[in-house]
Image: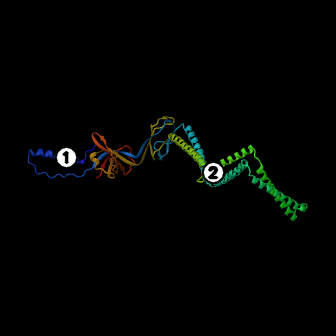
């Protein structure tokens, strides 16, 4: 209902009085009229409707058969409380359980890959030491096989042969003397000091003679093609091992083996992808399971329940109306553009319900809409008013008269 501002009423009254005065002046002379006071202040009066603090019409986001109903009209519920539930949950629950198992397996794989990568860095000092030792051994192997190969393929110098033979002759003479010196003591007890001394000299002389003979034979010996080929192959294998040992050592100078690190990181990436996929599956299954539940979006009262066990419901079909009656508000949508400029948030108002004319409730303006509506040719705005007092007789939807206090 649209109300005329009080100043319009005053103006119309003044106009009527002036019209009567003009008519009287044509018939008789009137006394000078007394001044009529001009009313400067006026109150804006509007109609509104009582609404709860919050209300919602609830519906399932998916269709199905109603399997359980947990509330009745008038029940007080908490935010997040399940009000009703649809059936056909087993397959979704199985999907959720399988996704949770996959997540556990993926997390274990991820942990294992992360531990392996960490072990590479933890074991790197020892691996670097081993690589250095392997490099040293490879160098020695190359040296030994090269010497053997050169020995097999390079003929000996005659001077070296002559020197080697002279060493054989001298060593043989020393061996004969050692035998002669030991012979008188050969039958002596084993713990006899003289016998032990000469026996030691004899053993040393024998070793020197044998070594001299080997050196001489090595110089005069002619290697076969097989021996030369074998020596060459051993030398090439040793060179290849040295090259690999050098590479392994160089790779470990700045950290663990890059190939091993790359492999561990690839395992981590693969496990992380599995974890992400499993989490997505869990979220999807949980969302599908949640869609079977009708949940209170805030704490309030069930004011309307349109559900029957076993019935089929469709997505978006309103089945429950929920309201929060902890506070009352008045919504008025007929403040004109002329009136709204005199209204401010926080402004005091008086509220009189049409059904309770003796009730005079206090309130204040909570909000004023920024956007307008056009109604019956007028530009209007909606205001929301918080009622300071709560009367047990108030009901949702009651019409009220709101007077905005100056």
Where disc 1 sits, the SS reads helix
| Crowd rating for badge 2 (residues with CA inside 10 Å; few <14, some 14–19, many 20+) | some
> Can you see residue 401?
yes
Query: Which circle's residue, 1 or 2, is located before the other in the chain?
Result: 1
Indicate the quadrant where residue 92 lies: top right
> Can you see residue 207?
no
Q: Nearer the viewer, residue 12 or 92?
A: 92
Number of marks in picture: 2
Where disc 2 sits, the SS reads helix
In the image, residue 69 sits, relative to residue 156, either above or below, namely: above
Residue pictured at 78% horizontal, 53% vertical: 216
Indicate the quadrant where residue 377 lies: top left
Real-space Cα separation, disc 1 to disc 2, in angstroms: 113 Å
Indicate the quadrant containing the N terminus: top left, top right, bottom left or bottom right: top left
Residue identifier under label 2: 246
Q: Where does residue 148 sit, x and y in percent of width and height? A: 72, 50
Q: Where does residue 298 sit, x and y in percent of width and height? A: 45, 46
Would residue 305 be found to the left or right of residue 165 on screen?
Answer: left
Dot 1 and dot 2 residues touching (CB under 8 Å)? no
Indicate the quadrant where residue 279 lies: top right
Would residue 358 be found to the left or right of residue 101 on screen?
Answer: left
Q: Where does residue 388 sit, x and y in percent of width and height? A: 37, 52
Q: Nearer the viewer, residue 306 or 135?
A: 135
| Crowd rating for badge 1 (residues with CA inside 10 Å; few <14, some 14–19, many 20+) | few
Q: Where does residue 154 sit, x and y in percent of width and height? A: 72, 49
Would residue 347 be found to the left or right of residue 115 on screen?
Answer: left
Would residue 75 be found to the left or right of residue 242 on screen?
Answer: left
Identity of the residue furthest to the top in this view: 312
Residue identifier under label 1: 13
Residue pictured at 74% horizontal, 43% vertical: 225
């Amino acid at each position: 209902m649209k109300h005329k501002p009080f100043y319009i009423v005053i103006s119309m009254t003044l106009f009527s009085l002036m019209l009567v005065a003009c008519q009287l002046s044509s018939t008789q002379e009137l006394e000078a009229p007394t001044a009529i006071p001009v009313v400067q202040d006026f109150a804006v009066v509007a109609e509104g409707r009582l609404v709860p603090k919050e209300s919602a019409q609830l519906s399932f986001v998916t269709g199905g058969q109603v399997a359980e109903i947990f509330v009745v009209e008038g029940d007080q519920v908490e935010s997040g409380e399940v009000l009703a539930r649809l059936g056909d949950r087993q397959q979704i629950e199985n999907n959720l359980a399988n996704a949770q198992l996959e997540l556990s397996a993926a997390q274990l794989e991820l942990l294992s890959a992360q531990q392996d990568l960490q072990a590479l860095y933890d074991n790197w000092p020892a691996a670097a030491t081993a690589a250095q030792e392997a490099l040293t051994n490879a160098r020695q192997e190359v040296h030994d096989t090269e010497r053997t190969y050169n020995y097999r393929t390079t003929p000996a110098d005659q001077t070296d042969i002559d020197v080697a033979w002279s060493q054989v002759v001298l060593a043989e003479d020393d061996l004969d003397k050692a035998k002669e010196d030991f012979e008188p003591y050969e039958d002596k007890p084993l713990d006899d000091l003289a016998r032990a001394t000469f026996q030691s000299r004899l053993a040393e002389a024998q070793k020197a003679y044998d070594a001299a003979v080997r050196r001489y034979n090595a110089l005069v010996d002619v290697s076969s093609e097989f021996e030369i080929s074998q020596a060459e192959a051993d030398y090439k294998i040793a060179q290849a091992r040295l090259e690999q040992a050098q590479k392994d050592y160089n790779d470990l100078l700045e950290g663990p083996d890059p190939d091993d690190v790359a492999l561990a990181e690839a395992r981590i990436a693969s496990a992380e992808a599995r974890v992400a996929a499993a989490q997505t599956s869990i979220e999807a299954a949980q969302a599908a399971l949640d869609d079977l539940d009708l949940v209170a979006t805030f704490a309030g009262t069930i004011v309307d329940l349109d559900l029957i066990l076993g019935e089929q419901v469709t997505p978006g079909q309103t089945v429950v109306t929920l309201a929060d009656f902890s506070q009352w508000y008045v919504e008025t949508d007929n403040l004109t553009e002329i009136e709204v400029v005199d209204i401010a948030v926080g402004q005091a108002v008086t509220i009189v319900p049409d059904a309770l004319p003796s009730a005079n409730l206090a309130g204040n303006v909570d909000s004023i809409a920024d956007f307008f509506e056009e109604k019956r040719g007028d530009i209007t705005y909606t205001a929301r008013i918080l009622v300071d007092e709560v009367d047990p007789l108030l009901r949702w939807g009651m019409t009220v008269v709101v007077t905005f206090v100056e």
